[in-house]
Amino acid sequence: MATTQQQPSSDYVTLVSCDGYEFVVRRSCACVAGALRRMLDPNSSFNEAVTGRAVLENINGIVLEKVCEYFYYNEKNKDARDVPDMDIPPELCLELLMAADYLNT
Amino acid sequence: MSNRRATNNRIRGPQSALTDFLASNNISAAQIRTDYERRRREAQSRINSERPAEDSAAEVETQQTATSTENSEQRKKRKRQEENAIAKIKKNKNKNNKNKRRQRFAVDSESDEEDATWDLYAKSKPLPGQLENCEICNKRFTVTAYSKTGPDGGLLCAKCSRELEAEEKKDKPKKKSGARERRRQVQSRLLDGIVSLGAKNLQELCVEKVADNINDVDEFGDLPQTLLDRLSQILSKKRVITSRTLDLFLRPDLDKVAIYDAGKLESHDFVKIFAVIPNLRHLLLLHAGQFKDEVMEYMLERQVPIKSLQLEAANLISNRMWHELFRRAGGSLEALKLAWLDSSFNDECVQVLADNCPNLKRLKLRKCFHLDENALVSIGKLSNLEHLSLQFSGQVEGQLVTDLVNSVGQKLFTLSLTKFENADDAVLAAIHASCRHLRKFRFSENDLCTDAAYEQLFTDWVNPGLVFADFSSTRDLDYSNPDGPDEPVGLASKGFAALMKHSGSSLERLDISSCRHIAHSTFCEVFDGIKIYPNLRELNLSFIPRVDTLVVAAIFKSCPQLQKVVAFSCFGIRDVIVPPNVALIGIPNAQENIMINADALAYY
C-alpha cells in the first residue's frame, strides 16, 4: 500500500502475453476492459496495481495485440456516433472472443 | 448452317475424352498445328529478312519463292484481321449503354469491303481464339470477349483478368460503404432502439464476426453459455441453424440448449441433443416443427431431467404424448412455455399438467388454439405459480379470470393477460386484493374495464412498484365516438396518473400505446420536468394523438435513464430535440436525431 501511495500511478501500464510479448498501453485504454480495470485499480493492493504490469496467462501475443488495438479503437471512438466496426481477421475471432469474455470488454 | 449439318451427319469412330473435351471447347488440333506452323514460318522469314540480302543463299530463295510471296500476302491479311479483332473486342468492352445496333452500323460504315467480309467471317465463328500475349505475364493466350484490358491498354490472359477483377472488387465496396450505407445502418439500428455512443464492445464484435464465418468454424471450444446464447440468436436470425451448426452448440457439460429457429432441424437432430447432453435441464426450441412424438418418447426414456421447456409450433406432438410428458416428467418440470399449437394440446392436457406438475413455477401459453375456459379452471389449481402469461384465442368469461386471479394471485411475480376481452372491473379488483409481489404486469387489448377501476387498482395497492407495465390497447372501441363515453373506458387520465404515482419510481418499461383517452393535461402533470422517473428506460406512446412536442420534451427531462421512446402516429411531435443515447422512433417525417450541442446538453 505504502509504495502505491508514494509513487503516483503511471499513465502507462504493461500487458504481458502468455508467450512473453509485452505491450505498453495507456492506462485509460487498458481500463476499457473491466477485468484489467479492477486488476490495475490503484486503490487495490493487487500485485498488478502495485507494479503496473499485468500478466495474462491465457492470452497469446497475437490475440493480445488485437486486444490492445481494440482498446485504442474504443478510446478513440468514445463519444463518436455510428462508429465503423473494427476489422477482425476471421481466423482470430474465436480466440479473441474468449479473450474478450475473460477480460470483460 | 451447312457446317453444323456436316458435323451432325458425320460418322465418327471412337474418340478419347480429351478429344471430346477439346471439340466441345472449340479447340481443334489441326488449327493449333497450322498456327504453330505459321508462327515458325514467320520467325523464319523474319530471320531471313534481317540477314543482309547478299547473305541469303540462292537455294533458300528458290525454295521459298513459290510460298513466300503468297505467305507475305497472307501474313499481312492475317495481321490486319488480328488487329481488327482485338480492336473490336476492346470496342465491345468500352461501349456502355450505347445503342448496340447503332454502333454496329457505325463500325460497318467505317470499315471497307475487306473488313465487311471479315465481319461475316467473324459472325459465323465468334472470335475463335485469337492468340495474343498477355500484357502482364507475357503468356500466350486465347482472346475471348471476357478478356480484360490491362493498365497499358493491352489485353490480359484469363488468370490475370481474374486477378484484376478481384482487385477492383476489393476496392469498390470501400468506396460504396460511405455515408449512405452508414446512414441506412443508423436508421435500422434506431428502429431496433439502439442508439449508442462509442464503439461496440469487443465481445459483440467478435460474436458477429464468428456468426459471419460460421461455415468455417469447427467447434466453439468452451465458450460460456451467455455467448453461445447470443451466437444462437444471431445465427437463428440469419436462418443458418442446420444439423451441422447445431453440433457446435452441443457439449455434454452444458445444461441448456436454446435454438431460436429450429425450422431446418429434423427429428434426428432433436434426438441428438438428448443423446449428447443427457443432463439437459433447459431446452428452448422455436419453430420446432419436427419435434415429434418419438423425440419426446426418447427424451422420456432417457429420463432427461428437464426443468424448463419452451417449444413453439411443435404441432406433431399428439395429445397422448403431452399427457405422457406431464405424467412421467411432470415432477421436475418448473417452467413450461408453449406457443403456436393448433393441432393438439387441448383442455385435457392442461388438466393433466395441473394434476402432475406441482412444482411448476412458470407457465406461458400463447396462441394454443384448442384451449378455452376449462383450461383456465385447471391452471387455477397450480398453487406454486410465480409467473403466468396467458393469451387465449377464444372468448373467456370474465368471472373465470377473476377466479383464477383469486386462486393463484398471491405468489405471482409476473401476470400477463393479453386479449381477455370479457375481463371486467372485477378482475382488476381481484388483482388489487390478491396480488402482492407483481413486478411485471400486462393487461392489454381490453375495452371493458373502466378508468375508475384502474384508478382503484393502483390507489393504496400493497403491491410494490411495478417494473414492467403494459396496458396497450385498453380503450373504448366506438368508431362513431372517438372521444369515448363520458365515463372513460380503458386506462385514461385518472388511471394513468394513479399508475405513475404508484409505480413511477420503479418502472423500467411502460407501454400505453393506444390508450387514447389520456388527456394532454394529465401528461403535462405526470411529466412536469420536476418529478423524476429514475428507472424508466422504454416507453411506448404510439397512437395517442394528444402526445405532442411539449409532452415528449418533458418526458426527456423527467426520465434520465430513457433509452427508447416509440411514438408511431403521434403527429403532434415536431422538431423535438432528442438527447443523445435516446432513440425516438416513429415520428412522422423521418428526421434524424438532432445532435445537441454542449449548451443544450447543459440544459438537460
Image (tube, coloured by chain):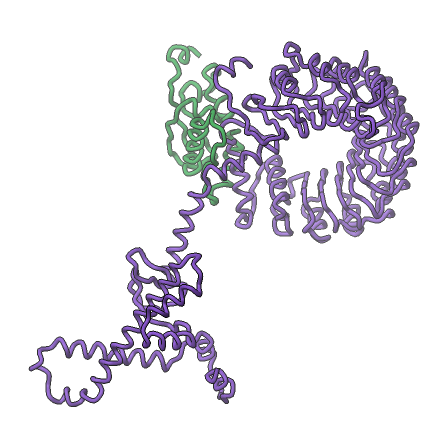
Picture coordinates of residue B594, whole percent (x, y): 53, 25
Chain A drawn in what color?
Answer: green
Work out whether B521 lies above or below A76: above
Picture coordinates of residue B537, whole percent (x, y): 64, 22
Horizontally, residue B427 falls left or right of residue B13, namely: right
Work out whether B111 lies above or below B266: below
Picture coordinates of residue A41, whole percent (x, y): 47, 18
Residue at image location 80% in from the left, 16% down from the top: B458
Which one is nearer the viewer's eye here, B286 or B217?
A: B286
Residue at image location 54% in from the left, 48% down from the top: B217
Residue at image location 47% in from the left, 14% down from the top: A43
Which one is nearer the viewer's eye here, B305 or B244?
A: B244
Quarter assignment of residue B109: bottom left
Quarter the C terminus of chain B occupies: top right
Quarter assignment of residue B346: top right
Question: Which chain is displayed in purple in the rendered image?
Answer: B
Q: Do we see residue B388 in this rendering?
A: no
Picture coordinates of residue B117, whole percent (x, y): 36, 77
Horizontally, residue B299 falls left or right of residue B559, namely: right
